[in-house]
Image: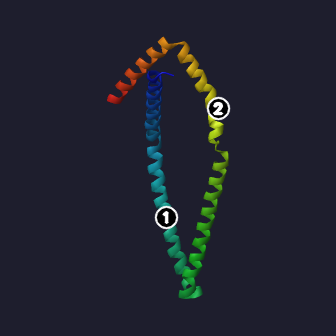
Amino acid sequence: MNPLTSSAIAALVRQGIAGRAQAAVGRLTLPLICGLIALQFALTALGLLAVASWNLLLPEIGPVWTPVALAGVFLTLAGIAVAAILSHRQKRRSERMRSSDIEALIAPMLAEARRFTRDNQGASLLTAIVAGIAAGLASRD
């Protein structure tokens, strides 16, 4: 593949990635802000629950065992959360494709692209010029 064609393809890919990333940021901003606010409320509620539990348990089990009991509850909840995160990561890791699998899928497409550009050099050059102009105009915005 000649360098002009490969640089044009790279410019098109970069332009497409930048456009998709900008759209994704726009779609995710409001849910992220709402999620952070909800997390703050949940942490506040957890703190208030801890204070209420402390006041409830203090006369029953005394000033020494109250913090021990609450620490045990919170450590148990933290252990459950860590176990859930680890099992989710393990599942995602097993679902991910290996790089050799990806290379096996991409290799025929690259061979076809090389053959196409070799057989149609004029059209490839024109495509590279148009892609360069489009990338240059997009980078000005």
Circle nearer the N terminus (1, 2): 1
Pick the residue in front: 16 or 123: 123
| Residue at 43% in and 28% down | 11
Within 10 angstroms of label 2, few (less than 14), some, or many (20 or more) residues?
few
Label 1 amino acid? Leu
The residue tagged 1 is 43
Question: Does residue 141 appear anywhere in the picture?
Answer: no
Question: Does residue 13 appear anywhere in the picture?
Answer: yes
Within 10 angstroms of label 1, few (less than 14), some, or many (20 or more) residues?
few
| Residue at 45% in and 15% down | 125
> To which quarter of the image does residue 65 belong?
bottom right
| Residue at 50% in and 13% down | 121
Secondary structure beneath dot 1 equals: helix
In this image, 118 relative to 21: left or right? right
Above/below status of 74 relative to 65:
above
State the mark number for residue 116.
none
| Residue at 64% in and 62% down | 83
Label 2 amino acid? Leu
Residue 16's x, y, as percent?
47, 30
The residue tagged 2 is 105
Image quarter where the C terminus lies is: top left
Tell me how the rendering is colored.
rainbow
Above/below status of 14 relative to 124:
below
Pick the residue in front: 20 or 103: 103
Residue 54's x, y, as percent?
53, 79
